[in-house]
Amino acid sequence: MTHEGTLIGTIRALYRYPVKSTAGQVLRVANVTAGGLQHDRKWAIYTEDGGIASGKRTRRFRPVPGLMQWSSRVEDEHDVPILVSPDGARFRADDAAASHELSEVFNQQLILRPETTIQHHDETPLHLVTTSSLAALADLSGLPVDERRFRANIIIDTGTEPVFQEDHWIGAELVIGDEVRVQLGHGMPRCVMVDQPQRGVPAEPKTLKLLGTHHNTNLGLQAHTIRTGMVRIGDSVVLRGPEVPTISKKLDQSTDRMPMR
């Protein structure tokens, strides 16, 4: 325990996705704003009927298979994203050539647009995943689990146990490094996109089924920014709120007992 809370780990990885539903950009330092990581999902690709191109179909989203083989990055923090095709061709998101290329490749009318009053995030502006939850899923599947599959912003190194420990953090607060504070929300519900291939990550068709069987289809936590600032790889992560309970380290027991949210 610290005088301000419980040290639960450190920042292992930081990711942002400047163009929604494309492969992300690895960061060593990130600016956490009220709307999440700076530039995260601030652009999206829209279909002709006004839906957002994605890996799933809902009222809001339209499936565009293969889109996650493209990537996006921001190279100048004051500029628009660069969209990168699987063969390495680069396009500015605000250049009509980018929308034209996407339309040609995917054989449908697609257009890149910046975020307006409606946020591009599916749930909350920030999404966190712990290494212990990734380890739990690897134990369940019998295969290594690539953290990129879950498209989180912040990966917290909590070791490999206790499993799914963040279930007990809902409603608490995290202090990250010297500046940032975030409010933790509910578990992050998963969809078919976790099964699909993305740039550098092969398809794994049983991921969603495993999460549905053992953890109510959730992995990681939703979060909102309380205090903005910079975060860095290696920053401490301190939990404020209810003390971290003692959790069984046996996967078969913990998956039976975890609260399902």
Image (tube, rainbow, N blue to C red):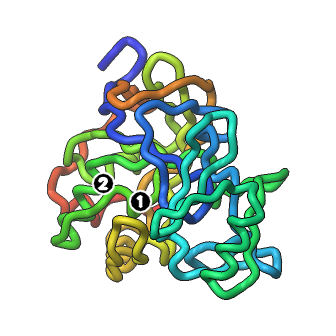
Q: Toward which corner of the image does residue 11 lie, by quadrant?
A: top left
* Number of marks in picture: 2
User: Residue 224: x, y in percent?
Assistant: 61, 40
In the rendered image, is residue 252 in sight? no
Query: Is residue 167 or residue 235 the one in the foreground?
Result: 235
**Is 144 positioned to the left or the right of 113 in the image?**
left
Q: Are marks 2 and 1 in contact (CB under 8 Å)?
A: yes
Circle 2: is it few (<14), some (14-19), or many (20+) Cα within 10 Å? Answer: many
User: Mark 2 to mark 1: distance in Å?
Assistant: 7 Å
Query: Is residue 162 or residue 146 the one in the foreground?
Result: 146
Q: Which residue is mark 1?
A: 219
In the rendered image, is residue 188 in sight? yes
**Tag on residue 76?**
none
User: Residue 77: x, y in percent?
Assistant: 62, 34
Seen as rendered, the residue at the extreme bottom is: 107
Tell me the quadrant of the picture where the N terminus can be found.
top left
